[in-house]
Amino acid sequence: MTEPGGLVSAYVHDAELDAEATVRPKRLSEFIAQDRVRDQLDLLLQGAMRRGSPPDHILLSGPPGLGKTSLANIVAAELGAGIRVTSGPAIERSGDLAAILTSLAEGDVLFIDEIHRIAKPAEELLYSAMEDFRVDVVVGKGPGATAIPLDVEPFTLVGATTRSGLLTGPMRDRFGFVAHLDFYAPGELELLLQRSARILGVRITEEGAREVAGRSRGTPRIANRLLRRVRDFAEVRADGIVTLEIARAALKVYDVDALGLDRLDRAVLTALVEAFRGGPVGLSTLAVAVGEQPDTVEEVCEPFLVRAGLLARTPRGRVATEAAWRHLGHTPPTGTFGANPISAPDLFTAGEAERP
């Protein structure tokens, strides 16, 4: 079963957190791509430092693996402040959040990942902390309960979310700066891979970096993960240099094709085309056909397949496009849904991509 930590999944695996931390940029000047967001953040931070006050609260949205956590750490580094890291699912009660907020020093950064999943009581407590730097802690139960106001040191909240639409209006309105991170172009991923290769001590050619970048789904986390696996192949079965040929051979071993599809992606497309004649077919039926959970197919596979123009979601179910038929080596029947295939280099430069 493919889990959210698979080779071409944008979700982080616990075992690779240390490896990912070593290649993360530490300053805004080291952060590759996202030029618009980087310039806006620079203005925000520089203005706050000149005034000698914490910057406005920051909300970062976008698909996983694009650098939201890296930017949160960069904000703290640029401010010269400490950072406290937690996640929305970890904050189940308002008391948990109150303990974190009251332990912050002046000017600290509080980073809450997946902030849209924070519990409702904690979210309401966060409102007053963000606006007035004050929290009300309820002591006791029933008629004898009293609310004790506690002051919180001025801080900056950095929230990250992969589903900004699930944020409540009152929460979203309390952020002074909101930024959306977009997928990287292949050229930007090449620069990122060359930087990561220098840090990891991997010898890689321009052609090798270009090949890995083209199969990375426009996502830095996937690019760095593939680089580490290609490095293993180059060190064990070659001379340690990642060339074009070595990159192709390594990615073939790991079942990552020219578009960045893995075994599960191709299984979904194959089932659609060969078992269901292109669809439409329901999500549950499709998941059973490939031996996976519906959530895995919907959250791990479908976002990229839809963005690549290989699969379409319709009111009647999932449909394989003409591009999917051709990618699998089949001739699409007359009237097949969709247009021409999108090549990997053009995938993130052919206009605004559909976001998962």
Image (cartoon, rainbow, N blue to C red):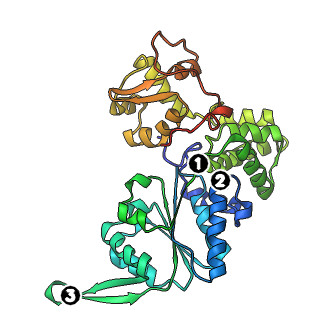
Residue at which label 3 appears: 145
Label 1 – label 3 distance at C-alpha: 47 Å
Quarter of the image where one finds residue 204: top right
**Percent x, y of residue 98:** 39, 80
**Percent x, y of residue 324:** 53, 23
Do the CB atoms of the residues marked 1 and 2 lie less than 8 Å apart?
A: yes
Please report whichever mark, 1 or 2, sits nearer to the chain's N-terminal start: 2
Q: Extreme top residue here?
A: 334
Residue at which label 2 appears: 34
Element marked by disc 3:
loop
For the residue carrying disc 1, how many other residues have a C-alpha within 10 Å: few (<14), some (14-19), or many (20+)?
many
**Percent x, y of residue 286:** 38, 29
Residue at which label 1 appears: 182
Q: Amino acid at mark 2?
A: Gln
Q: Amino acid at mark 1?
A: Asp
Q: Extreme left residue here?
A: 143
Most foreground residue, 1 or 149? 149
Left or right of residue 246, residue 302 in this image: left
Please report whichever mark, 1 or 3, sits nearer to the chain's N-terminal start: 3
Label 3 – label 2 distance at C-alpha: 49 Å
Residue 338 versus residue 117 in the image, above or below? above
